Image (cartoon, rainbow, N blue to C red):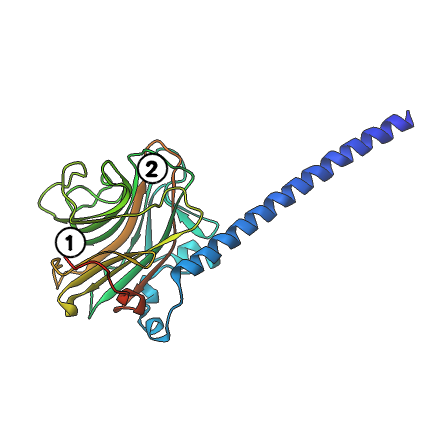
Amino acid sequence: MTTRKTASSLQLLGKITGTKAGTEQKKMNFINGLIWLYMCVWMVHGKVTQKDELKWNKGYSLPNLLEVTDQQKELSQWTLGDKVKLEEGRFVLTPGKNTKGSLWLKPEYSIKDAMTIEWTFRSFGFRGSTKGGLAFWLKQGNEGDSTELFGGSSKKFNGLMILLRLDDKLGESVTAYLNDGTKDLDIGSSPYFASCLFQYQDSMVPSTLRLTYNPLDNHLLKLQMDNRVCFQTRKVKFMGSSPFRIGTSAINDASKESFEILKMKLYDGVIEDSLIPNVNPMG
């Protein structure tokens, strides 16, 4: 009888020990995954020069999301829309199937000389056909205050939308759209003014989108994806006196695609990495 009890006790102890070991292993895997993720963030962002550091507008940038302990206080400059949530040092815009989310800077931004915006993002958990996508916004005026267009705007907005999605013709790509707030923008029929191929779906490594606008350089508008020039043009001129509303939004359709934001930095000027030359003629 004693032998049976002892054996049962040993079996129970083994199960408990195994459960604890499994839990600890999961914790270690999670921590290692998080460390790897932010090592990748550091690598894709590259180094910031001392001159660029002086241009960094911290009041209009996201704080270090790994260090946020009081969301109400530390994220008071930001509006979180729909299902977006802060999770393990990143904003998850689409935390489940058929979800959408957005992240908007509350104060409007007025350009003094020039500006550079860097977003670090990731699409994770799904690869394949989808009607979802991730949009980055630079809007002027009050038009477009709804979420019908990729979770971030109405179709009648005034400004610039940069969209990552699986285009019917291009495949995984970045497309850029302009609208003046007087008409609906239809993704299926409205022409984009610039595009480039860019693989982003289900990536372990985050990517960086860098948008530079310099009115003093004949209205140079330049988009870089992971330090490669996607497009640049001097044919786009924003309303000089109207401030910008800056944000990002996403919708994942019926997939499990998780669109995540890890960093956002805004600079009052053109930074060194913005000057990486384009190998193609400027349009």
Tell whether 7 sits left or right of 50.
Answer: right
Q: Position of residue 121 (x, y in %)?
A: 37, 51
Is 51 on the left-hand or right-hand side of 215?
A: right
**Residue at 78% in and 31% down:** 11
Q: Please name the residue that numbered disc 2 is placed on.
A: 252
Please state which amino acid type lies under the numbered disc 2: Asn
- Is residue 22 found left or right of 157 in the rendered image? right
State the image quarter where residue 151 is shown. top left
Q: Of callouts 1 and 2, which one flags the residue occurring earlier in the amino acid sequence?
A: 1
Q: Residues within 10 Å of mark 2 (few under 14, many from 20)?
A: many
Considering every residue shown, the one lying at the far left of the view is: 182
Q: Amino acid at mark 1?
A: Gly
**278, 28: nearer the viewer:** 278
Residue 234 in percent (x, y) is at: 13, 61
Which mark, residue 141? 1
Q: Quadrant of the C terminus?
A: bottom left
Front one among 200 and 18: 200
Residue 16 percent coordinates (x, y) = 72, 37
Please identify the residue farthest to the right as the structure is shown.
2
Residue 275 as seen in the image, left or right of residue 260: left
Give coordinates of residue 71: x percent, y percent. 42, 54
Q: Secondary structure at mark 1?
A: loop
Residue, far top: 1
Mark carried by residue 250: none
Tag 2's secondary structure? loop
